[in-house]
Image: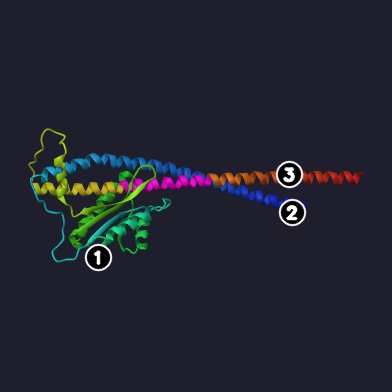
Amino acid sequence: MKQTVSSNLMESLEQLHKQLDSLDELRTIVKTMKALSAASIRQYEQAVGALAGYYRTVERGLFVVLKDRPYPPAFSSRRAGEPHRLAAIVFGSDHGLCGRFNEEIASYAVQRMASAPAKARNRLVLAAGGRVAASLEAEGETIEEDFLVPGSASQITATVQQILLKIDEWREQAGVDYVYLFYNRHAGGGGYHPTGVALLPLNLRRFHHLREETWPARSLPIFTMDRDRLLSRLLHQYLFVSVFRACAESQASEHASRLAAMQSAQRNLDDRLEEVTIRFRRARQNTITAELLDVVSGFKAITAERK
């Protein structure tokens, strides 16, 4: 009977030891993912910050080109008599362990698209990230194409160029006149909030607000290049910057969400590790006590036989 009890205690002790090893391994993985997410957030934040000055330059260039046009035309390709067609680019993630990051932006995008003038059958959706593509399909959307999200800030440019080529294809071949960007905007720390931007058609009147701002130089710059050609190039740069910023913001938000999830996971692991450690120590103490009792009982039995 005592041998059976001792055997059960040893078996329980071995199981607890395995649990401790598994928890230690998981904790190491979580700490590594936390470090990677923290480093990734920093590089994407730097990318967004570096882009801010260039975006401002492009915006001022558009203002200078358009300042003599009281009613600039909208940058749209819609043909008269055709139904409205809408295209959306939704930025998400290719990997999990980031909470409801993909589900929230997918739900937000579907709600915003439902309020647009284009009907559901006239929507074209491009998903940047396999996880967000699955979330959009779960919401009932049909995904025309999905891209991999860039693995680093240096790879964003290639992804943005692919997206811009797709936008040109939509406008020329599918007659798309509304293009939206949907992404999670980084709000500092582990926070983010879903954001939607109407990329096309461009209302060029919006750049006239710079009239009310103080110009950084004494006089406005002049240009000798053909106005329409210069406007076209500036608009393409404006689209590039807008998509680039959305992609970088989304990536920063993804890693911030993953960092918050890993911090929560580490707290849970620490609590579980403490609980299992206490159980392991108790089981080990019970095992030692049982072995000592066996020794004492054996000694008493031998002493009794000698007497």
The mark that comes first in sequence, 1 or 3, is 1
Q: Residues in magenta? A: 248-269
Q: Main secondary structure of the magenta part?
A: helix
Give the residue number, with chain letter if any, for mark 3.
289
Residue 255 painted magenta: yes
Helix, strand or loop at mark 2: helix
Instruction: Tell me, for residue 92, which label it has, or none.
Output: none
Q: Mark 2–mark 3 contact, CB under 8 Å?
A: no
Q: Nearer the viewer, residue 189 or 41?
A: 189
Which quarter of the rendering shows the C terminus? Answer: top right
Side of 249 where 198 appears, left or right: left
Q: Nearer the viewer, mark 2 or mark 3?
A: 3
Q: Residues within 10 Å of mark 3 (few under 14, many from 20)?
A: few
Question: Taking the image as drawn, is residue 78 in sight?
Answer: yes
Give the residue number, with chain letter if any, for mark 2.
4
Q: At 72% across and 44% down in the image, what residue appears?
A: 288
Q: How many marks?
A: 3
Q: What separation in Å lies between label 1 and label 2 (alpha carbons)?
A: 72 Å
Give the residue number, with chain letter if any, for mark 1.
119
Q: Nearer the viewer, residue 97 or 83?
A: 83
Q: Residues within 10 Å of mark 2 (few under 14, many from 20)?
A: few
Q: What separation in Å lies between label 1 and label 3 (alpha carbons)?
A: 75 Å
Residue 207 painted magenta: no
